[in-house]
Image (tube, helix red, strand yellow):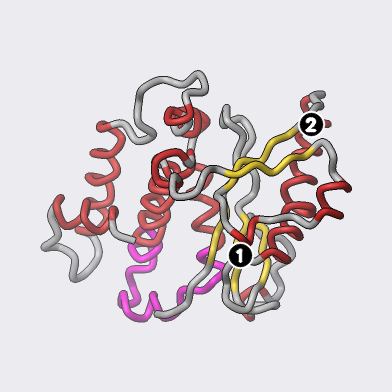
Amino acid sequence: MKDRITIMLCANATGTHKLKILVTGKSKNPRCFKHVTTLPVIYKNQKSRWMDRELFEESFTECFVSEVQEEQRRTGRNGKVVLLIDNAPSHKLSPECIAAYPDFVVDFFSRNVTAIMQPMDQGVIEKLKRMYKKNVLSKLLGDSEESVTQLLKSFTFKDCCYMVSDAWDTVTAENIRRAWKPLNIGTSNAQVLEPTENAMNVSETLRILHCIPGCGGCDEDDTAAWLNND
């Protein structure tokens, strides 16, 4: 399988507002989306499936600004909004876009500090990936009448979108608050994934694996290695 997608996660520092996941794929109208009226994610297409300036500006205005404004109306809050994001060339806005939204500011982390400061990299993305993998295994288990190979061949981009959205739902406000520890913004010293939660993820995943034909020989070390591997 060589299909790839890019996803972008975004939430406020308190974890009370998680925006819909932005998913970037190659096709403008994927065949599996036929007859689908709504998706649990926001889908955009780009030839390389990567983020570029045009796509970032489009997603900033149509997704980020609109969702935050709706949240402000819902909660009765207003004021300046800062979007903290990685310092990448594709994350630049045009002067026209900046002028159009004076209450929205895009600020960047310093170069080469993503791994140690970017909140989403402090366990949030890790938890989402783990829960996504668990969702894939659950699908294999639920459709056990077919072989694993047949199921993987029938796995669609639509399935991926729903599973990654379900995984995002499992990320809690507390998980996100903990992820701000490196920036010292009023958070505790705990990790996003506590040891008990981490062990539970491994044991639950191993239990599912043992129910799938051909995976009975897996142990906890195998499972932990697979969960930690991109």
Please state if 221 lies on the left or on the right of 146 as rendered: left
Q: Nearer the viewer, residue 208 or 195?
A: 195
> Whole-Å distance between the Cαs marked 1 and 2?
27 Å
Residue at 60% in and 52% down: 21
Q: Which residue is mark 2?
A: 72
Q: Nearer the viewer, residue 100 or 152?
A: 100
Q: Which residue is mark 1?
A: 51
Q: Of the numbered discs in the image, which one, if any, rests on residue 94?
A: none
Vertical relation: 132 (above or below) 16? below
Q: Position of residue 160 (x, y in %)?
A: 51, 65
Boundaries of the magenta span: 138-160
Main SS category, magenta section: helix
Say which amino acid is labelled 1: Met
Q: Position of residue 41 (x, y in %)?
A: 63, 56
Q: Position of residue 123 (x, y in %)?
A: 39, 41
Image quarter of residue 45? bottom right
Question: For the residue labelled by badge 1, is the local secondary structure a helix, a strand or a loop?
Answer: loop
Residue at 59% in and 71% down: 25
Position of the C terminus, as image quadrant, is bottom left
Say which amino acid is labelled 2: Gln
For residue 145: magenta? yes
Position of the N terminus, as image quadrant, is bottom left
Residue at 63% in and 57% down: 22
